[in-house]
Each structure stands twice: as C-alpha cells, then as structure tokens.
Amino acid sequence: MRQSNLFLTTLREAPAEAETISHQLLLRAGYIRQLAAGVYTYMPLGRRVLRKLERIVREEMDGAGAQEVLMPALQPAELWKESERYEVYGKELMKLQDRHEREFVLGPTHEEVVTALVRGEISSYRRLPLTVYQIQSKFRDERRPRSGLLRGREFLMKDAYSFDTGWEGLDLAYEQMYQAYGRIFERCGLKYRAVQANAGAIGGKGQNHEFMALSEIGEDTVAVCTSCDYAANLEQAEVRGKSVTPKRDFSGNAVPVKFHTPNQKTIQQLEQESGIKPQEIIKTLIYTNGNTVFAVLVRGDHEVNELKVQKYMGGGEITLAEYELVQQAAGVESGYVGPAGLSLTVLVDQAVAGMAEGITGAGEKDYHLRGVIPGRDFPLENVGDFRNAAAGDACPECGSGQLEFHQGIEVGHVFKLGTVYSEKLGANFLDTAGRSQPMVMGCYGIGISRLLSSVAEQNHDDEGLIWPSSIAPFAVHILLMSAKDEAQREAAEALYIQLTSFGIETLLDDRDERAGVKFKDAGLIGIPVALVVGKGSAEGKLEYMDRRAGTKEVIDIEEAVARVRGI
C-alpha cells in the first residue's frame, strides 16, 4: 500500500474526551473515528488490525472443533421474555419496534437465538456434541460510554456456544475453549490472566472464568497469588479461613462499656477523633433483599462482598437499606448501629467471629460500645466468608502465597451454562433410552474490538503505538525521506516491490512531506519495523528501525530484506 493513497489522517493532539492512552492513540493515529458516543468507524488501518484479530480467533475456534455461523443482530423480544432475561438486562437492551409494532432488540449477546436455532435442528443425542461460533456486532445501551472501544454501545464480538448430552461433555468443551483462549491472547501479544469470575447477566450455575488484560485503567480488580496460579476477580476471590463458630468460655469477661463518640459515624472519623484502629472495629451494615432485612458484620478495615452475601441468602438482588429502613429495623441511624440486642438475622464474617473483642455501634446516637465479644454479645449462627479479599491475605488455594491486586480489562469470558437456557427455551434431545433431556450448554465470548484497544493500551511508547507483529496493520513501513530525490525514490520503489513480491505486507510512505512529518506519523501508526530510505541508498544502505526494541542501525538493503523475511 502506498501511503499517498491510504485513507489516513493523523492528529497532532487527541480530542479532549479521549482519556485513556489507547483511545487517544487510536484516534491520533487514524485507526478509528467517532460517529456518536460509544459508536465508532474503523478506518483502513483499524480494519486491518481487526481482520488480523479475527483471523487468529477463527483459526483457534476452527482448531477447537467449532463451526462458524452468522446469526441475526435483530432479535424478537419474545425470545428474551421466554428466557426471562428481558427485564434482567433492562435499559442496556437496545429496543425497537417494526411497522407492525412487533418488539425487537439489537442483540447484546446470542444465547437465546442460538438455543432457538439448535432446538429446531437437533433432536437426537447422535448429533451432539456441537459447538458453533460467530463474529458479529453487538449492541448495548451503555449509560455512559467511555474509554473509546473499551466500553461502547456497538462493538465487535466473537461468541461461541457448545451443546452436549451431559456435564462431562461440557467439561471437555469448556477446557478446549479455555485452552484456545490462552493461545488467542498469547498470539495477540496480550499480557493477561484467567481469573475465577461471576456469571452476571449471562447466568448459569457452573464454573466460569474471565480473561483479563492487565492494565492500570482496568475497571476490574484481580486478586493474584504471589506463589501459585490462583487468580480471581475481586468479587469472586475467596478468603482463607474457617467458617465455623468458635467455642469460648465467657466467664470473667467484663460487660461492654459505652463511650461518647459525637458525630463519629464513619471508620475514618472514629480513627481520627478517637484514635481507634479500623481493625478493632466491627462494622454493622443493614441490607435488604426485598423480603428480609438483615445485618452483615465485617471488620472495620474490610469491605462487604455483596455477591458472597447474596449467594448465602439464596440469590436475588440485595441492597444497602435506606435511612428510614435502618431506623425502623435498628432503632438508630447508620453509623451507630451495633449487633448487640439487634433483632435481625446477623451474618458474621469469619474475621469478626475470630476477634477476641471489638468496638461496635451502641444502638444509640453518638455512642459506641467497647469490649463487645462475638458469641456472647451477638450470635454466631451465620458465620462465613462475607468480605472482599484484601492485599496480603493468604492465598485461599495454596496458603503459602499472599494475594496482590492488579487492575484488569475483561477481554474474554467462558461460562458453563448447564441447562439454564435449554430448559427455558425447550432445547431438548432424545437420549439412548428415548427419553427427552435438556441439552447441556456452554458459552464463550471474546470482545474483539475491546481486544484491539487492550493490546493498544499495553503496547505504546512516547511516540505512539507499537503493534505486536501478529496483528500489526502492516509488517514493514518504508519511509522515503525525499520523494524528489530520484535515487532515493528508485531504491524505495525497488525495495517495496521486492518485499511485496514475497507476500510481506508493506506500507510505503511515498508522500511529498518533510522527513519530520513522516517520522512523526510512523511513530504514531506503530508498525513494528521501519526501513528509512535516505541519502545512504546510493551506497545500498538504509536505516533499520525496530520499534519494539527501540533500536536503529544502518545496514545493507539486502540484509534488511533478509531480516524482514526472517521475521
């Protein structure tokens, strides 16, 4: 490709709304252009990178035995109501009506559609297992699209779905996809971790993992062991310990002492005003799941993990109780609620249950209690892991390592769905005995446009992008320093023809621009190898620039060709 013909405009400054490095550089280097909030056009360079990503994904999906299909983005709302996810997705669903006032949605995912497809095609165990996948645009009505391609309203995604006769078959399909995902991300040059995760709105009761691109801008927090391979999303990270009620002898213990704490409602205020250490405090938080009001106790330096609490309480959404409900249930405003004498179900985090004594709210405004003893002053009937893991906690898997935290961008997710969709949508098969059974399903997604942005976020320097060679828009960038110099022009043209004849994707900057402009644009675009054809071309020399290594050296033109062919 000759750069004089390339549909490309670079920007010297990033638009003000571009906050992340990847968003800034993809805009400045001419890879994407915004049409509306969260909606982008992929320019020729951006489309070339997407195609490289798609090729890698297709190769690994085909290698794992999946078959490619293409399903409609426009989906009948009835399917979503049948699966009972229409209300779950809520306002994130892009909803519309046709001229006959029939309801449709623009698919954010395709569990419903693929299940309806397979239930109409397969009725016997003889045609299972089956795995299909597609690469297609998805739509979600994000409340606040941000970070460029990382959180948009239209995005490109690969989604795969497996169907089997039982859980053993699902386990095999899941492992095949898990391994394929690792190969995909490694081939894309991504630094990532696979972590235990929450199924969220996709649903399913089986195992699931998120694949996280490690990045400071990531919205997710990942807990990683310093000694073993354990990794989990913060909301899923377990806390090593015992969820059993300790046996104690309370004889001889003094009763709790009430003391004055005016306007000290928070942990920070108690620490600053009364000199109390957070780990000495037992926090009492009042929650409701719509039917029940209950309390959760965690240590003052810990945070409640609402997902763990929700699971313990049997599922369903839980929320912190509003001011009026706290007053009604505890008889005092938040900040002074304590577990002593509280006539509610009390969930006690195992770290609290293990405390010899602690400081709690006194159940009276502007007062706290000192010397509150777990098991004596409040019951230990519901002890468990109810808090977020914290840095320095012992690894729940190996016990010898400690947990440390990283930020991550979710680029892939694999789920064991089980029969949650097949049962609701009637995707059944006849087994060997002629009995009707629901198909056992798995779901496997990769955000391809998000993957592009994540790789950009990890691969750049002060000049611009530096693409891994596997997904770079071109393998080589020839920079002709003077288009008016006949010797340089002829050398650059000959080099370009030679490289392209070998099937090497080459971009020739043949524009009549200053050398500084060409270097600036090349730095932004981020092609991993640049060959600078200048005055040395008369002696058969050029400058070989390796963007990733940050090296420059003058070598023979033929040596440069051989080196590029080797790469």
Image (spheres, grey):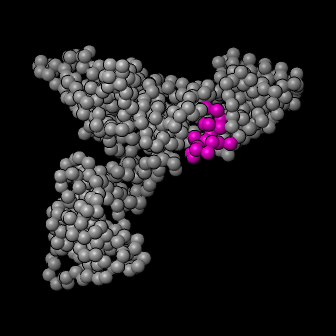
Nearer to the camera, 167 or 82: 82
Quarter the N terminus occupies: top right
Q: Position of residue 408 (x, y in %)?
A: 46, 46
Residue visible at 69% across and 16% down in the picture? 501
Range shown magenta: 13-31
Asked if residue 484 is among those painted magenta in the image, a careful observer would answer: no
On screen, residue 231 above or below 51: below
Any part of residue 84 in sight: yes
Q: Is residue 484 left or right of residue 161?
A: right
Expressed as whole percent of the image width and height from the top left, the position of residue 382 reads: 18, 60
In this image, 286 relative to 402: left or right? left
Q: Which quarter of the rendering shows the C terminus?
A: top right
Q: In the depicted view, which residue is nearer to us: 492 or 17?
A: 17
Q: Is residue 23 magenta?
A: yes
Q: Residue at x 28, y 69 (%)?
A: 333
Q: Please state the horizontal and vertical placement of residue 2, each as a whole percent of the image.
A: 72, 22
Work out whether residue 183 can be spotted. Answer: no
Question: From the viewer's perspective, is residue 270 above or below residue 57?
Answer: below
Q: Which residue is nearer to you in this view: 426 or 13?
A: 13
Q: What residue is shown at x 37% (from left), y 27% (from top)?
A: 96
| Residue at image point 46% right, 43% down | 144
Does 338 sit left or right of 490 as displayed?
left
